[in-house]
Image (cartoon, grey):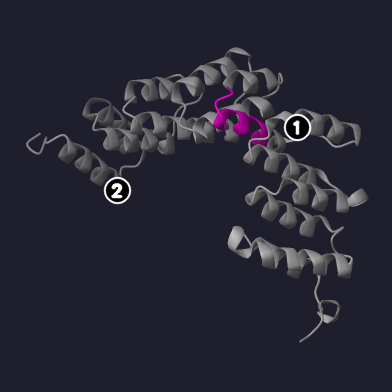
């Protein structure tokens, strides 16, 4: 049998192999690959380290994940830090994240949207809304991260409140903001809160496009709200006169509400 040290590999090969070792069933193989990375001196490579951390976090092995992070030494970059912080968020170990953020800053790395998304989403997922709100900074990046977390977890009312706050602060919504709002609109509609979803659309600071009205119509179809669904359909058909899918959605909504004769 070929010895580990005789196997020819590079960082891309190891990182890709580690990414495939998700779940406890492949943890043993992943640890073998980790050993090979150490033997080959590739454990310091950020791509390999990030794959190792993700594998260990998926099995809640925080000690090994942290070891993989430390092995990168001076080759750490913002993505390496984000992988570590996201991992602790996934594992609901929010208590250590503030210390990690301070260390990250002390070592000269800036927090970006991915960092904030991981932290805030972790707090929202475990119900720590107030803590997440306290973490918000007076900039659009952190506000978007919170809005994205609300959308991901289907927290429509909280999302609406935050969206209004973003507008009240005078921030100019960007594509991330609007994508989160789209998710909110669909989730609210799906949960039967179509009036609230419609209010979000009406209060948007730009003219809603066909994607926005389509999200609202999709939510109305799911919840069976014909009244608001017809408003969304009318707007949508005016923007996309030749799209037959819109007619199908409207027909499905009528069918759900047993309005075949209308």
Marked residue nearer the N-terminal end (2 or 1): 1
Residues at badges 2 and 1 in contact (C-beta under 8 Å)? no
Q: Is residue 85 visible?
A: yes
Tell me: 209 left or right of 33: left
| Residue 218, numbered circle | none
Q: Secondary structure at mark 1?
A: helix
Question: In front: 50, or 137?
Answer: 50
- Locate the C terminus by quadrant: top left
Whether residue 56 sits left or right of residue 234 in the image: it is right
User: Is residue 145 rendered to the left or right of residue 83?
Assistant: left
Quarter of the image with the N terminus in it = bottom right
Q: Spatial distance from mark 2 to mark 1, Cα to Cα?
A: 49 Å
Q: Give the residue at x 67% y 27%.
A: 142
Specify the quadrant of the image occupied by residue 215. top left
Q: Which residue is mark 1?
A: 96
Q: Which residues are magenta?
A: 117-128
Q: Dot 1: within a 10 Å radius of its alpha carbon, few (fewer than 14), some, or many (20 or more) residues? A: few
């Amino acid at each position: 049998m070929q010895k580990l040290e005789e196997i020819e590999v590079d960082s891309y090969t190891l990182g890709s192999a580690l990414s495939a070792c998700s779940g406890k069933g492949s943890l043993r193989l992943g640890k073998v690959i980790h050993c090979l990375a150490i033997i080959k001196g590739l454990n310091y490579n950020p791509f390999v380290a990030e794959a190792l951390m993700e594998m260990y976090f998926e099995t809640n092995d925080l000690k090994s994940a942290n070891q993989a992070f430390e092995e990168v030494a001076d080759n750490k970059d913002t993505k390496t830090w984000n992988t570590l912080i996201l991992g602790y968020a996934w594992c609901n170990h929010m208590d250590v994240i503030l210390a990690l953020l301070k260390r990250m800053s002390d070592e000269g790395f800036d927090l970006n949207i991915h960092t904030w998304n991981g932290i805030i989403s972790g707090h929202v997922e475990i119900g720590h809304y107030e803590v997440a709100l306290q973490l918000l900074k007076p900039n659009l990046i952190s506000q978007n991260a919170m809005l994205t977390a609300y959308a991901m977890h289907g927290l429509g009312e909280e999302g609406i409140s935050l969206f209004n706050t973003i507008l009240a602060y005078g921030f100019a919504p960007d594509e991330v903001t609007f994508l989160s709002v789209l998710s909110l609109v669909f989730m609210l509609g799906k949960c039967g809160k179509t009036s609230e979803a419609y209010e979000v659309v009406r209060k948007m600071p730009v003219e809603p496009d066909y994607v926005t009205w389509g999200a609202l119509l999709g939510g109305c179809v799911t919840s069976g709200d014909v009244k608001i669904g017809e408003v969304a359909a009318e707007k949508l058909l005016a923007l996309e006169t030749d799209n037959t899918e819109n007619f199908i959605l409207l027909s499905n909504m009528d069918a759900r509400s047993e309005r075949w004769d209308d």
